[in-house]
Image (tube, rainbow, N blue to C red):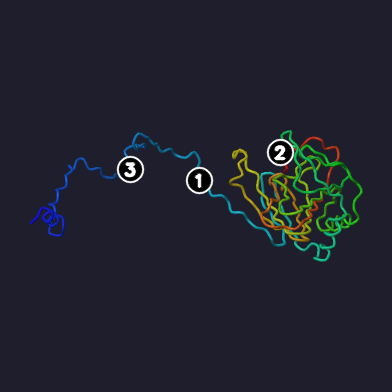
């Protein structure tokens, strides 16, 4: 038999399997077994060392956002400054009344875009506004001059709101949100001229936008809003929302930008301004809007 055939037979199916090599035995004393608790608070992987440390703060759940969309009075908190109360009245104006008021106010009010200042830099508000009142209105280091020439429709709406709410309102801030990109940032209506625990009456006309509120954090949170209570209120065409009691002291509110198409919305915020109140109310932080 040739060497070639012999090599083929050895390498093929006739070749005998190689004998198994015995596994090396490991002394029992060298086997590492898991223990109920590690011998120390640190362990090594290669040349890196890791040390377990107890977290500084216990883990907390972020409160779920609550939705308010039914007619009624809501006590949303009882401290620290007193009772904060909301009164929601969907359908305060009928659809026909709201349609007519929206069309008239959108075309006949003197809308303009206000310039504000933040850290010394000017920026344009992402909405249009106009002001009516016997005294000027100042926020974000910018002032809207007094304007006593009320549109007749605004006088009619003010009378209807006063009949529902009780307080007399001598001022009005009008906001026009042109589309989903217009907004107003987190703030409180806590200017000194509004006095203690003011009542703000907000009438919505046009497309629905979400009105959000968040509770101001206690001092020990150092301004962290992560774990505060939050509310969400969809304000529909013709809805009246009253903010009463300590709402401006203990809560902030906003209308955020949205990421789907929205038609224009008008928001009328009736309030009572007091002249001669130059200093800010104690314990209230300066207003900030963007």
Q: Is mark 2 on a helix, strand or loop?
A: loop
Q: Residue 37 carries which label?
A: 3
Residue holding disc 2? 285
Q: Which one is earlier in the sequence, the residue at label 2 or at label 1? A: 1
Quarter of the image with the N terminus in it = bottom left
- Mark 2: give few (<14), some (14-19) or many (20+) Cα within 10 Å: few
Q: Residue furthest front?
A: 2
- Mark 1: give few (<14), some (14-19) or many (20+) Cα within 10 Å: few
- Mark 3: give few (<14), some (14-19) or many (20+) Cα within 10 Å: few
Q: Are marks 3 and 2 in contact (CB under 8 Å)?
A: no
Q: How far apart in space, not on screen, are marks 3 and 2 (Cα)?
A: 51 Å
- Image height check: is 95 above or below 222? below
Q: Which one is earlier in the sequence, the residue at label 3 or at label 2? A: 3
- Image height check: is 14 above or below 278? below
- Image height check: is 167 above or below 286? below
Which residue: 31% across, 45% down? 36
Residue holding disc 1? 59
The image shows residue 197 at horizontal and vertical percentages of 76, 45
The answer to which image quadrant residue 166 occupies is bottom right
């Amino acid at each position: 038999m040739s060497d070639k055939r012999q090599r083929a037979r050895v390498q093929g199916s006739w070749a005998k399997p190689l004998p198994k090599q015995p596994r090396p035995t490991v002394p029992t004393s060298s086997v590492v077994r898991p223990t109920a608790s590690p011998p120390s608070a640190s362990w090594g992987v290669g040349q890196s060392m890791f040390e377990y440390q107890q977290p500084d703060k216990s883990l907390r759940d972020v409160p779920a956002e609550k939705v308010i969309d039914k007619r009624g009075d809501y006590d949303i908190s009882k401290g620290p400054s007193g009772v904060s109360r909301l009164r929601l009245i969907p359908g305060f104006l009928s659809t026909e009344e709201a349609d007519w008021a929206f069309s008239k106010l959108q075309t006949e009010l003197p809308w303009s875009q206000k310039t504000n200042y933040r850290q010394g830099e000017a920026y344009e508000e992402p909405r249009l506004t106009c002001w009516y009142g016997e005294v000027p209105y100042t926020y974000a280091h910018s002032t809207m001059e007094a304007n006593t020439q009320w549109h007749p429709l605004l006088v009619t709406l003010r009378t209807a709101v006063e009949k529902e709410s009780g307080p007399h309102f001598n001022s009005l801030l009008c906001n026009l949100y042109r589309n989903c990109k217009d907004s107003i940032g987190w703030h409180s209506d806590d200017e000194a001229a509004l006095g203690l625990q003011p009542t703000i009456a907000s009438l919505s006309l046009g497309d629905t936008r979400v009105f959000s509120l968040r509770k101001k954090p206690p001092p020990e949170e150092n301004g962290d809003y992560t774990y505060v209570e939050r509310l969400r209120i969809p304000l529909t065409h013709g809805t009246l929302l009253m903010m009463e009691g300590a709402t401006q002291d203990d809560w902030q509110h906003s209308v955020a930008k949205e990421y789907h198409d929205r038609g224009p919305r008008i928001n009328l915020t009736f309030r009572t301004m007091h002249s001669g109140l130059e200093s800010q109310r104690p314990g209230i932080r300066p207003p900030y809007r963007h």
